[in-house]
Amino acid sequence: MNRIPEEVITAVLSHTNIVDVVSKHVHLTKQGKYMRGLCPFHSEKTPSFTVTPEKQIFHCYGCGKGGGVFKFVMEIEGVSFPEAVRMLAEDAGIPITWELRPRERDEHAEEKQQLYNAHELASRWFHHVLMSTEQGRPALEYLRSRGFSDKLISTFQIGYAPQMWDALTTFLQKREFALPLMEKGGLVAFHEERNQYYDRFRDRIMFPLHDEQGRIVGFAGRAIGDIQPKYLNTSETPIFHKSRLLYQFHEAKSTIRKNNQIVLFEGYVDLIKAWEAGVHNGVASMGTALTEEHVKLIRRYASRVVICYDGDDAGIEAAYKSLLLLERAGLAVNVVMLPDRMDPDEYITKYGGECFRHEVMHGAMSAVRFKLLYLKRNFSLHSEDGKLRYIRSALRIVAALRSPVEREYYLKELAEEYNFSLDTLKQELYALLRSSQKLPPNGDNIGKPWNNGMNNRREEVTRPALRPAYYNAERNLLAAMLQDAEIAHLVQERLGDAFNVEAHAALAAYIYRYYTEHDTLEMPSFLVTLQDDELERLATSLSMEDAAAVMNERALEDHISQIKKAPMQQAIEHKKEQLQRAERSGDVATAVQIAEEIITLEKKLKDMQL
């Protein structure tokens, strides 16, 4: 921090709106003077993540994280404070003229930058080979036969890796890229017997893969002929982590945020064809099943997901697994079931983009209906036994619904479809519900049931232990001090550093020092001075309270008195415990002595209250 000029930090804060920064990662909705959304730092179903535009801070009532815009970037991007300042300075167009890190750490950053540069150059080279060379002609004709226009190929920068041993390797070497580093980045490989580097991708159509910032970090290579595997993806590298990235996310995220909805595809070709059809909020996993990291990324931008996988058995199975993962994160999910086991590419080719858009936007079925259809595949519905077992399993799905209206709706459907009495199904359902209520609550925040969308039995929640009076008094004073310089000066004169809680005393010291240089306390710049996670969380939490408005002279004196009395009260309690032990052990002399000490302490405490 000391290497960054203070005027730079001030400039970054003045040119940055925390709402804009947070909105890149969290879908926020306005509620009065606050903005709220699902916390990106822990799993929850009920929004407890709050941004206060007026104070330029964020605070989560669920996990306790909080701070200013620098802290948010540090937490969400996993970077240091100087790196967060650099990132926000770049966004604000502020020149970076300071040294961020020691030289030995710069080597690692330089290595990553070289890999970014090499991948960008390789992408342009692959595209040139496809569009402008004889080697690329068969691949270009294949793409055109699959319905890819030249405009679409250019939009997605699709390329071709020629069927040559070391064409890309030679190209990169001529441009002075170190081949050992290119191997580390997954662009080339090393042949032990020949003792030389060669192209990792050969005779493949190349799809560039981008990170969230839009940088090319890897490739997916699709074989044209019979070579295996059909898809060859970049392996894990210093800049490519397939379990965290989603294909086309960098282009789709603005539409995703605008619509509060994301469409999830399985394959690159499906996504590209859907994009051409007008579905611009689509993404695809990069050659892997949906992961927890993917879901976290999705949750930062949208609360609704439409799954649009292949219509065959493998696609349905993958859709079911993804559905469960997404629902556990509190997302609303719908599923598109394409007819005749088609994949999205085939459907668009046969019926056109307009029909496909209608299927995605209006034809997607609810998660419950998809689960029931998926469940049917496991039972023989031609037999009575199979039908009964299916109904019992289906009722468990319906019982999990929180809405009585939804339960009634699906119960009626089951009753009509399988010729059961609605009352009979209701009895079975109520039996399941009574049974489930005996189980431990299952929700997003077991330790914090007040923020648990699945827990409606609030009266059974174990309340946290009450804080001592001095603890609350100290918090109230600190909250008021953050909002009012005069109150801070009065507390400094009458109380100084005599706070009983160590963190409270530390925060008070920072507040006193800040007011020696500033007339008013601006939260963003004050938080920068703390550089301590615990103190930042404490200050942010306190700043959410409107304490200064009710802190009159009488209240101020009462709070200070409460805090000053606390050590004496604690000493008396400690003496009383000693007295009990002495009495139990029969030590009369010690008991008498301690009793006299208690009387003396209580007299001093009474004098303090006068």
Image (cartoon, rainbow, N blue to C red):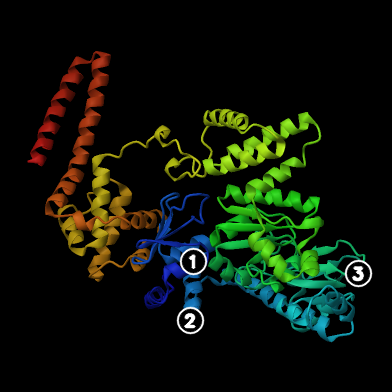
User: On the rendered image, what quadrant is the N terminus found in?
Assistant: bottom left
Q: Is residue 94 left or right of residue 524?
A: right
Q: Are marks 2 and 1 in contact (CB under 8 Å)?
A: no
Question: Neighbour class for label 3 at 10 Å: few (<14), some, many (≥20)?
Answer: few
**Label 1 – label 3 distance at C-alpha:** 52 Å
Residue at point 42% right, 75% down? 12
**Label 3 – label 2 distance at C-alpha:** 49 Å
Vertical placement of residue 587 versus 265, above or below: above
Q: Amino acid at mark 1?
A: Ser
Residue at point 15% right, 53% down? 494
Mark 2 or mark 1: which comes first in sequence?
A: 1
Q: Is residue 480 left or right of residue 311?
A: left
Q: Dot 3 corresponds to which residue?
A: 194
Vertical placement of residue 524 versus 570, above or below: below
What mark, if any, has residue 23 been given in the picture?
1
Question: Neighbour class for label 2 at 10 Å: few (<14), some, many (≥20)?
Answer: few
Query: Horizontal and vertical percent for residue 262?
Result: 61, 62
